[in-house]
Image: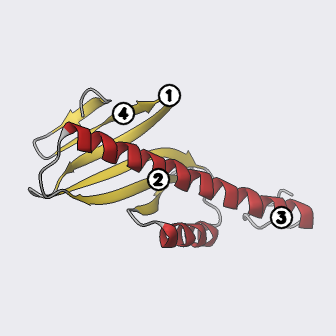
Amino acid sequence: MKHRMLVLFETEEACAGLFHKGAEEYVVLAGTLGRTQGFLIIADKLLPFAQDRALFLAILDRLNKDSLSGLHQLLDHSGGVIYLYKQIICFPQGVSQELFDQLLEGGIREFRQGLRYICQELESVLTVVRRSGGSRMGTDRN
């Protein structure tokens, strides 16, 4: 895992670091929950659209209903919300570097698809709001 990402913090059970894929950078927390289970958390984006929490929760609900391998979540942060993807992993044979790399690639792919879906849904709502002249996002701007 060290050769694929810049490790910022490491213990025996977990490590946190920055994973680079092309021009993109992701914050990754990965670790073990015992001999046969592990976890992967990928976070990166601060989304400034926190005014309409119900809209975000509805989008996440639809996204999580379609997700087979993990959970998409938003964490409150001043100035917006942080989007992250979490996954619990079972590996009966232990985790090799090759398996971890595959799981990390899959997690990054799920994260990117989730972020793309959130942005598409928000853009669709904003387009409707602009056309109707209303203010769906809790601001006074049209």
What residue is pinned by disc 2?
110
Q: Residue at x 50, y 28 (%)?
A: 22
Which quadrant of the structure image shows residue 136?
A: bottom right
**Cα distance, mark 4 to mark 1?**
13 Å
Q: Residue at x 26, y 55 (%)?
A: 39
Q: Residue at x 75, y 64 (%)?
A: 125
Q: Secondary structure at mark 1?
A: loop
In the rendered image, residue 51, in percent from the top left (x then y), is placed at: 64, 62
Mark 2 Cα shell of 10 Å, populated few (<14), some (14-19), many (≥20):
many
Instruction: Tell which circle, 2 or 3, labels the residue nearer the N-terminal end.
Output: 2
**Cα distance, mark 4 to mark 3?**
37 Å
Disc number for residue 129: 3
Three-letter residue code for mark 2? Glu
Q: Secondary structure at mark 3?
A: helix
**Cα distance, mark 1 to mark 3?**
35 Å
Marks 2 and 3: which is nearer the front? 2
**Cα distance, mark 1 to mark 2?**
16 Å
Instruction: Give the side of residue 90 with respect to residue 110, left or right.
Output: left
Please report contact status of discs 1 and 2: CB closer than 8 Å, yes or no. Answer: no
What residue is pinned by disc 4?
18
Q: How is the image coloured?
A: secondary structure
Please report contact status of discs 4 and 3: CB closer than 8 Å, yes or no. Answer: no
Three-letter residue code for mark 4? Leu
Q: Is residue 131 visible?
A: yes
Instruction: Give the side of residue 95 with respect to residue 84, left or right.
Output: left
